[in-house]
Image (cartoon, coloured by chain):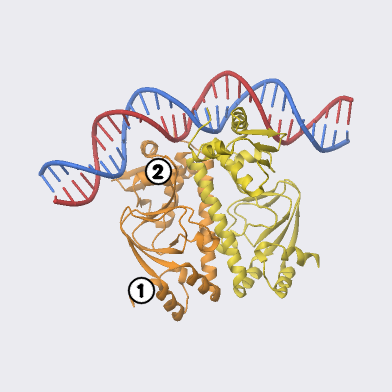
Chain colours: A orange, B yellow, C blue, D red
Amino acid sequence: MELINQIAAIPLFEGLPPDQLKDLARIVVTKVIKRGQMIFSEGDEGTGFYVLISGRVKIFKLAPDGKEQILHIPVPGEPFGEVPVFAGERFPAYAEALEDSRSLFFPRSAFVSLVKRNPALTLNMMAVLARRLRRFTTMIENLSLKEVPGRLAAHFLYLSERKEGAGELRLDISKNQLASLLGTIPETLSRILARMAKEGLIETVGQRQIRILNRAGLEALAEGGKRLS
Amino acid sequence: MELINQIAAIPLFEGLPPDQLKDLARIVVTKVIKRGQMIFSEGDEGTGFYVLISGRVKIFKLAPDGKEQILHIPVPGEPFGEVPVFAGERFPAYAEALEDSRSLFFPRSAFVSLVKRNPALTLNMMAVLARRLRRFTTMIENLSLKEVPGRLAAHFLYLSERKEGAGELRLDISKNQLASLLGTIPETLSRILARMAKEGLIETVGQRQIRILNRAGLEALAEGGKRLS
DNA sequence: ACCCTTTTTTGACTTAAGTCAAGGCGTATT
DNA sequence: AATACGCCTTGACTTAAGTCAAAAAAGGGT
């Protein structure tokens, strides 16, 4: 069955025996979400967690004045909304689809009982949580100790590490969203991109592509060793 | 034995059968740390994790210019340095004692094999990680979406929730450290405390005690609904 | 191809908070 | 008791980045 293959392809469930995959398939719910649709809100009861299958979603905090801070943009195959499964209480943030998306929803209790029976699954889930913690420490560091140019440079370097595409990288979110991910606003982001280009650090190719021209320069910016003039 | 009692008193190990507590006692190492001493550095190989027994430590990021951002100040009984145990790689931050402290060190491999055999321990550890994630999302929100007065107000409210001490609360770190926890600098913190006092929101009692005079006012500040004039 | 919407850019201005520097306070130590 | 050290506060100044406003550019749907 198609569903089982989808589940088996999720890194979190790597190495699960076929019968437990079948158990999962029995409890899972496929959710189709349209661009702009809210998946859950901060404060909602967390009755389970999600795994993104396709599309793109953002996990974010919302200030009363409407400003957003994006916490996380899961890649396909990655879980999200898992905090309440283990810590109880409510979702700590909002989740909304940036594009038409599909995800699998795993109800809490069925999943927890599976965890109890399966050490490998347990360790995988702890690895997910621990990696997310590591990302968040970096995010806190960036927000507190780097200025916007440094954060942007660090983000480009981060993207280029995962793509390995020879200094050519695709932003797969709009600049509005990127600003919100970096803890700034579109106007500021726009100005800093222009400055980076003027200094020959990067080159923008169309609206969603960046070419890194001076990697060492970006690294110096990200480390705080240099600044844009 | 004294050590076993100490281990049994750690919330993370709640409900472990006596023989597994004995296993833990066999692998654990007690570490005594003097005020100012570094426990581990960012980038160090993480060969295990710690549980704070007494004293006080800070987990923090360090910028090249020497500025610090504190990520976390564990309370006694709480684990720290656990990310590399589950996510591999290195410690994502520094740990240093703020006061003379004692902690227990649990080597990674022995602990992991124990986890594999014990679902309750597993779920406890996942709860620890998930709660920390929740704290970090709040920290990111505060850094990005609140100004310093709002962060400080939120911090006071957070402390007063855990102490229940009728609006009287003790800062158990210096104002220098508090500034570093809130993502600002001592000068700014000092000015904002003065403004809060002038507006009758709080009253400072000695150097490390704060009395909340207007809780609703603090809440409005923390939510961003009001600002200091 | 055109209209309408959303995204992005640019300009002028404001402001929160950082820097630098000096002085006062407090408490711990000999 | 005096000294010394770290901690905290205050003042004057600078600056990074936010706000507000408007125009330009890009995309999507009919």
Q: Mark 1: few, some, or many residues within 10 Å (few <14, many ≥20)?
A: some
What chain letter is assigned to the residue under label 2?
A: A
Helix, strand or loop status at disc 1: helix
**Label 1 with label 2: CB-CB less than 8 Å:** no
Instruction: Kindly identify which numbered label has been placed on residue A3.
Output: 1
Residue drawn where x is 72% and y is 64% of the image: B7
* Vertical arrangement, residue B97 with respect to residue B208, above or below: below
Q: Position of residue A98 (x, y in %)?
A: 34, 53
Residue type for callout 2: Ala
Residue at numbered disc 2: A179
Q: Position of residue B11 (x, y in %)?
A: 67, 62
**Front residue (pair C30, B5):** B5
* Vertical arrangement, residue A9 with respect to residue B89, above or below: below
Q: Position of residue A84 (x, y in %)?
A: 51, 60
Q: Are marks 1 and 2 on the same chain?
A: yes
Query: Nearer the N terminus, badge 1 or badge 2?
Result: 1
Q: Mark 2: few, some, or many residues within 10 Å (few <14, many ≥20)?
A: many
Residue type for callout 1: Leu
Left or right: B134 as drawn, with respect to A95: right
Residue drawn where x is 52% and y is 70% of the image: A112
Helix, strand or loop status at disc 2: helix
Instruction: Kindly identify which numbered label has been placed on residue B46.
Output: none
Is residue B119 something that shows in the picture?
yes
- Measure the C-alpha gap from mark 1 to mark 2: 36 Å
* Vertical arrangement, residue A6 with respect to residue B95, above or below: below
In the image, which is nearer the foreground, mark 1 or mark 2?
Answer: 1
What chain letter is assigned to the residue under label 1?
A: A
Residue drawn where x is 33% and y is 75% of the image: A2
Q: Position of residue A188 (x, y in %)?
A: 39, 36
On the rendered image, what quadrant is the N terminus of chain B found in?
A: bottom right
* Vertical arrangement, residue A192 with respect to residue A15, above or below: above
